[in-house]
Amino acid sequence: MQVLSVTPEIFPLIKTGGLADVTGALPIALAAKGVTMRTLIPGFPTVMGAFKNMGAFKKKKAVYQNPSLQGGKASVHAVQIAGLDLFVLDAPHLFDRPGGPYGNASGADWPDNWRRFAALSQAGADIAGGAISGYLPDIVHAHDWQSAMTLAYMRYGEAVGTPSMMTVHNLAFQGQFGAGIFGELGLPAAAMALDGVEYYGGVGFLKAGLQAAWAITTVSPTYAQEIRSPEFGMGLDGLINMRSSDLHGIVNGIDTAIWDPATDKHLVSTYTVETLKGRAPNRAAVEDRFGLDRDDSPIVCVISRLTWQKGMDILATVVDGIVATGARLAILGSGDAGLEGALLAAAARHRGRIGVVVGYDEGLSHIMQGGCDAIVIPSRFEPCGLTQLYGLRYGCVPVVARTGGLADTIIDANEAAIAAGVATGFQFTPNNGGALLHAIRRLTDAHASPATFETIQRQGMKTDVSWDRSAEKYVELYRLLLSKRVA
């Protein structure tokens, strides 16, 4: 089975969040199940840099060329990087620029993002329609709004009969643009309709993908149900309910080769479920890096974007209470300037009890998972979440809001679950500072009983957080779509 994946990000080449981790790990997991996935990605500078450093970059090796793709010359190159089969869209007029993949160095979105990702989608649809000699995918799998238009171009083009899947990693990001861009998208006039790309008088990229997809997936079963409600549907709940028979929730996995405490080169000390004492040097490294007191109290970490969605404002309101429970806080992240300031102020008030590092450091995030006692994730909504899965894998007990994938992946340490030895973390009511604080108190109480706490840690580390089961569910869904094509 040949699957074409279209995505704006893929680890380890370009990453701003969990989307890249998923699109980087899924092809490897699927390969073990007889599915060959090739991934089309934009030629961002980091991607082209990796390509050119291989010595494989030669214009004559392009497998697809378009002399005028959204305003400039473009080509697609087939290459293998980091064990991934890639189609790289080289379009310098769209992707060769400083800053991040979606915005400039100051964080402002590129004003032509609609054009950039329309081009990615057009290339995806062209490939789906046979533009590359010798390659014709059985299924096209698009990820988030940046590649969602692939399915719209397929619907109105040559690949209308090719099965397609739209995966929503976060419904909050939809790619909404004014109606004025429609004339430059290269779609027929009929597409500017309610059952096409039109969305509240403008053009909706994600909406178009949801409308055109043969199947829709989200990254956890609970989130799949949540987005059918006005509270979580972000204005798309009507469409999603209309497509409910085609909606599937498949929880994400993680790359257990990269995230393995027994072999992780980022750690000061490696360890296994049988050798939890090996976490101690990592704990000391966290204390040193964040300026925390050396004592036996639990270290609770935060590894997150500092945003409203992630519930960081809720955390900021209860940090004094968290310190009062006896816990220490180690916070790694960046985002909203006001939240950064509030957390830095809290660290200044509680020297030795709260430490903050503004920014992101991949290696440090591994050390935190390997040395902290718990990780708190107070998200208002969380389609899946990966940090709690890393926490399970590393014995860093998750304390999570009961929403989306967080609810699906963590077994709450209530009295019955502790007695049965199945608890893996602590859940609390979302968007509630008091509930968050109560969960931290439950954590500190459990931590005071080493036998109880180690049982929770070990049970979490035994949880299967790999892609194996989830990849099998994707394969089953791909087969279902192929059967519909044949029918």
Image (cartoon, rainbow, N blue to C red):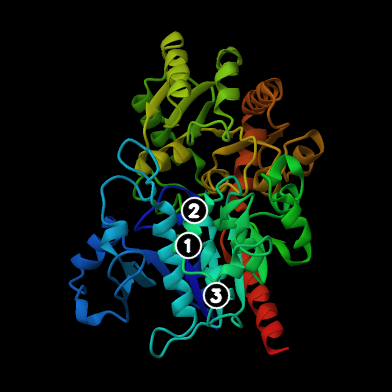
Query: Tag 3, which secondary structure?
Result: helix
Mark 2–mark 3 distance (CA, rounded to whole Å):
22 Å
Seen in the picture, residue 144 relative to 330 is either above or below; the reply is: below
Q: Which residue is mark 3?
A: 154
The quarter of the rendered structure image containing the C terminus is bottom right
The quarter of the rendered structure image containing the N terminus is bottom right
**What residue is shown at x 64% (from left), y 49% (from top)?**
200
- What amino acid type should be assigned to the residue bearing mark 3? Met
Nearest the eye: 106 or 463: 106
Disc 1 packing (10 Å; few <14; some 14–19; many ≥20) = few
**What residue is shown at x 34% (from left), y 27% (from top)?**
289
Are the residues tagged 2 and 3 within 8 Å (C-beta)? no
Going from the N terminus, do you reach mark 2 or mark 3 first? 3
- What amino acid type should be assigned to the residue bearing mark 1? Gly
Q: Return the mark for residue 180.
A: 2
**What residue is shown at x 32% (from left), y 64% (from top)?**
71
Nearer mark to the viewer, of 2 and 3? 2
Are the residues tagged 2 and 1 within 8 Å (C-beta)? yes
